[in-house]
Amino acid sequence: MNFVLIPVLVSWRPFNERSEKIAWYERVDIGSPKEAKTVEALEILQGDCVGPVKKVGRNQMLHIVLCEPEIPPNTGNIARLCAATGTTLLLVGRLGFRLDDRSLRRAGLDYWDAVELERHVTFRDFEAAWVEAGRWPERLFCLSKHAPLPYTAAAFRDGDGLVFGGETRGLPPEILSRFGDRALCIPMPTGKVRSLNLATAAGIVLYEALRQLHSW
């Protein structure tokens, strides 16, 4: 049976001398009375939004996974992107900054409370938590300039994860080699730059996935 994970509690707690936002989720089966009430509540909350609101049977959620990001403003800008789109942000591995870094907070403005944030110490821990949460490992897509397929070749689905490496190192070869045809690139036709800014790349791919999900 299909199910959704509904956030039921969000709080902050210490993590290695830093603050960490933790979300607890409750599994709700699709079609159950409780799921119907949740959808109705979501539609009521969206009623004051600018523009038409599409009636949906479930919340269309994507995940951005940052593996060892190094530059705080990039992660802060991606957090703002996640707040705007209802996307979960997952931070994996050793970070190049503290979660209370001023430049990180400044880039995210006052939207951090609207971000669903998960923190995982290693990529192995992240993968285990991904499966434990009922998500499919086959629905993780890695982004790398070394990948042969463009991001537009993927058929994205609700719940997919978009995995990005750090600004200077990218994703390790051992991770990329495991993803095969789920390793994607963003074409850079002039060949005059080595890579795109991390926040820019995340925005490009995330909005393509959203376009496919919402038929924009």
Image: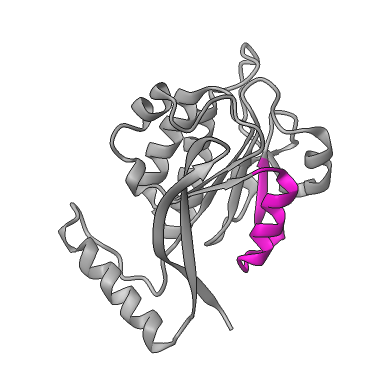
Q: Nearer the viewer, residue 98 or 1?
A: 98
- Return the x and y of residue 45 as percentages of the image width and height: 22, 64
Q: Is residue 187 rendered magenta in the image?
A: no
Is residue 84 visible in the rendered structure shown here? no
Q: Is residue 142 left or right of residue 201?
A: right
Q: Relative to residue 167, is residue 182 depicted above or below?
A: below
How many numbered marks appear?
Answer: 0
Magenta residues?
Answer: 121-142
Q: Residue at x 37, y 38 (%)?
A: 80
- Return the x and y of residue 95 as percentages of the image width and height: 60, 30
Q: Residue at x 36, y 33 (%)?
A: 108
Figure quadrant of the N terminus: bottom right
Q: Is residue 125 rendered magenta in the image?
A: yes
Q: Which color scheme does this rendered protein use?
A: one colour
Q: Relative to residue 140, is residue 122 depicted above or below?
A: above
Instruction: Name the outermost residue toward the left.
Output: 48
Quarter assignment of residue 127 = bottom right
Q: Is residue 61 left or right of residue 1?
A: left
- Return the x and y of residue 116 as percentages of the image width and height: 43, 51
Instruction: Name the outermost residue toward the bottom.
Output: 33
Q: Relative to residue 193, is residue 62 depicted above or below?
A: below
- Return the x and y of residue 160 as percentages of the image width and height: 58, 56
Q: Is residue 89 left or right of residue 144?
A: left
Is residue 186 visible in the rendered structure shown here? yes
Q: Nearer the viewer, residue 144 or 112?
A: 112
Q: Residue at x 61, y 16 (%)?
A: 190
Q: Residue at x 36, y 71 (%)?
A: 56
